Image: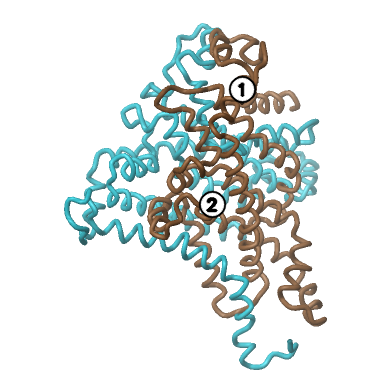
Chain colours: A brown, B cyan
């Protein structure tokens, strides 16, 4: 079992390992060791940071910064929007709750990439091209994050909220002081969903933010494969840097992620 | 803040406060999802062909033209073929890995993370890495050469291009779906397994008799969410093959994107968008069927 698991894990991570190694060696070395395959395909001989130099000469730092700004903004705004909506749908009672829930579900489950093109012309009419706002907005409402949080909120005992209400706490107080602190695992899970969506974003930034100043990391890396040939060294260096942030976050939060999905039961 | 509700407040419930909680999400839903969807439908019913004539109402003409276009039909066919292969494959592998990494084995947490890692990397980056792997002089052919097998075309071979895309997309997605299934496995009551073991049920019998039925809800969810994300695969296709060779990997999103940006045919792209959205919504409706059945 251990052997099988290890072999599979290594197979999955092998392409990333090779990319990371190739980011640290000269490009000709990368291709000289491709065929025939040897140990040197996967181990670097002669380390260099030249690939990273070229990457940063092409303003990749800017792109990585843009990605980070956009993703962090999406996380903060997205969690606020999704959590408040989930709270209303799980805890509050009002006429038409079913209808609102249905509208929310249907609209958020319309796949975003499928409507990216009409949405782009709406954003253009509103002169939102090449703005952080345009990059952030589509990521803030996420049907799956709402589901996750609503499921978790439904599991919080109603007595807690009722007791707090009797003591004179308003609904915002109930939300802020009771539900949010109890829901940390679900919030981390929802945060990861929002994070992956935005960190991965490619089609939308390609459409709405063509300005080099506003390029995000995934698009910037793809641009190293241009008409004048492909700079693989720089691409791998970019891949390493782009992967590093989620890697650290995932290693840190992985336990919570599994926990939050399971305790919400994906309702 | 009265604890004894009046008649009006009972009828309205928490409506005013609920509205303030819901407003941002409702605005996002309407402005960022429903409006563009309505716009796609509207655009698809009008002709905007290259500015030759003023925009005018053409009804379902765009759809008729699109569904008569062999390239679009090919794209639908390729998307269907892709879906039929990639979805069962990914779910089966994700399930097998979930069961494996849910065992109490040393280092299971680290192994899980390694398998999960590809989803944390932008798909455009994954696609570029795989583009090198698939090169004629790339490492995959290098391994084949060591084994004495002739070099393969992979992305340039009409027979292998779609399979190559499937490998890349699965490498990216399998770990993600695995996590949801692991979460489901953790919910299963361990005493069920203990009882079955006492009754002499083997590993396979326990998997079929307990794991599968208990996982039904998560499996239904993963099935549909996975199907939708595979319907919308775009970056790997655009970077690896651009839909070629000869349209063999021309998945629907790539086709629609090309109509909009390479051929600047906004009307046809809108009609294509609507068709993709309708297919996706149909899949979502199936999801709710399965989920509501699962919770009985």
Foreground pick, B259 / A151? B259
Q: Nearer the viewer, mark 1 or mark 2?
A: 2
Label 2, secondary structure: give it.
helix
* Residue B215 coordinates in the image, percent (x, y): 64, 48
Work out which residue is located at the far left of the displayed protein and give it.
B53
Q: Look at mark 1 in the image and give the residue it sits on.
A: A23
Q: Is residue A26 visible?
A: yes
**How far is disc 1 from disc 2 in space, using C-alphas?**
30 Å
Judging depth in this view, the residue of B273 and B210 nearest the camera is B273
Q: Which residue is mark 2?
A: A132
Residue A34, image x, y percentages: 55, 12
Residue at the image point whose x is 38% and y is 59% from the top:
A125
Q: Residue at x 51, y 59 (%)?
A: A108
Residue B231: tell me if it is visible. Answer: no
Q: Residue at x 73, y 43 (%)?
A: A254
- Location of residue B256 with respect to B291 vertically, above or below: above
Q: Where residue B274 sits in the image (x, y, percent)? A: 36, 54
Q: Are marks 1 and 2 in contact (CB under 8 Å)?
A: no
Residue A26 in the image, given as x and y percentages of width and height: 59, 15
The subunit carrying tag 2 is A
């Amino acid at each position: 079992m251990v052997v099988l698991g290890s072999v599979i894990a290594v197979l999955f991570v092998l392409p990333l390992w090779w990319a990371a190694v190739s980011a640290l060696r000269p490009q000709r070395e990368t291709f000289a060791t491709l065929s025939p395959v040897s140990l040197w395909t996967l181990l670097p001989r002669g380390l260099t940071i030249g690939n990273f130099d070229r990457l940063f000469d092409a303003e990749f730092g800017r792109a990585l910064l843009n990605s980070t700004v956009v993703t962090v903004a999406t996380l903060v705004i997205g969690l606020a929007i999704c959590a408040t909506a989930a709270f209303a749908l799980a805890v509050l009672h009002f006429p038409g709750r079913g209808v609102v829930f249905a509208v929310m579900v249907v609209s958020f489950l319309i796949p975003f990439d499928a409507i990216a093109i009409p949405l782009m012309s709406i954003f253009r009419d509103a002169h939102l091209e090449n703005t952080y706002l345009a990059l952030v907005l589509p990521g803030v409402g996420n049907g799956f994050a709402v589901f996750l949080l609503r499921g978790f909120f439904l599991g919080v005992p109603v007595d807690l909220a009722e007791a707090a209400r009797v003591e004179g706490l308003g609904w915002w107080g109930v939300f802020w002081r009771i539900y949010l602190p109890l829901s940390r695992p679900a919030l981390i899970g929802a945060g990861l969903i929002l994070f992956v969506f935005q960190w991965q974003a490619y089609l939308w930034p390609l459409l709405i933010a063509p300005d080099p100043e506003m390029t995000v990391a995934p698009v910037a890396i793809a641009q190293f494969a241009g008409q004048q040939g492909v700079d693989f060294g720089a691409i791998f260096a970019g891949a390493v840097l782009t992967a590093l942030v989620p890697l650290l976050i995932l290693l840190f939060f992985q336990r919570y992620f599994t926990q939050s999905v399971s305790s919400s039961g994906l309702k | 803040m009265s604890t004894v509700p009046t008649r009006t407040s009972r009828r309205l419930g928490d409506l005013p406060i609920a509205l303030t909680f819901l407003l941002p999400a409702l605005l996002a839903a309407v402005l960022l999802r429903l409006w563009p969807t309505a716009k796609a439908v509207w655009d698809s019913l009008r002709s905007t062909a290259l500015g030759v004539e003023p925009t005018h109402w053409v009804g379902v003409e765009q759809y008729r033209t699109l569904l008569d276009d062999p390239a679009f039909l090919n794209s639908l066919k390729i998307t269907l073929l892709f879906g039929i292969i990639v979805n069962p494959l990914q779910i089966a592998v994700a399930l097998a890995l979930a069961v494996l990494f849910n065992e109490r084995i040393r280092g299971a947490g680290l192994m899980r993370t390694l398998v999960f890692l590809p989803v944390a990397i932008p798909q455009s980056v994954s696609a570029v890495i795989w583009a090198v792997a698939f090169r004629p002089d790339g490492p995959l052919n290098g391994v084949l050469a060591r084994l004495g097998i002739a070099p393969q075309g992979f992305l340039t071979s009409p027979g292998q291009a779609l399979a190559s895309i499937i490998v890349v997309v699965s490498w990216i997605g399998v770990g993600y779906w695995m996590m949801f299934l692991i979460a489901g496995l953790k919910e299963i009551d361990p005493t069920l397994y203990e009882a079955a073991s006492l009754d002499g049920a083997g590993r396979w019998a326990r998997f079929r008799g307990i794991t599968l039925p208990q996982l039904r809800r998560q499996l239904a969810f993963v099935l549909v969410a996975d199907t939708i994300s595979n319907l919308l695969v775009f970056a790997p296709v655009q970077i690896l093959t651009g839909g070629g060779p000869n349209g063999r990997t021309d998945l629907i999103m790539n086709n629609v994107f090309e109509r909009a940006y390479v051929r600047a045919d906004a009307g046809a792209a809108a009609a294509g968008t609507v068709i993709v959205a309708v297919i996706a919504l149909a899949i979502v409706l199936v999801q709710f069927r399965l989920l509501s059945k699962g919770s009985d």
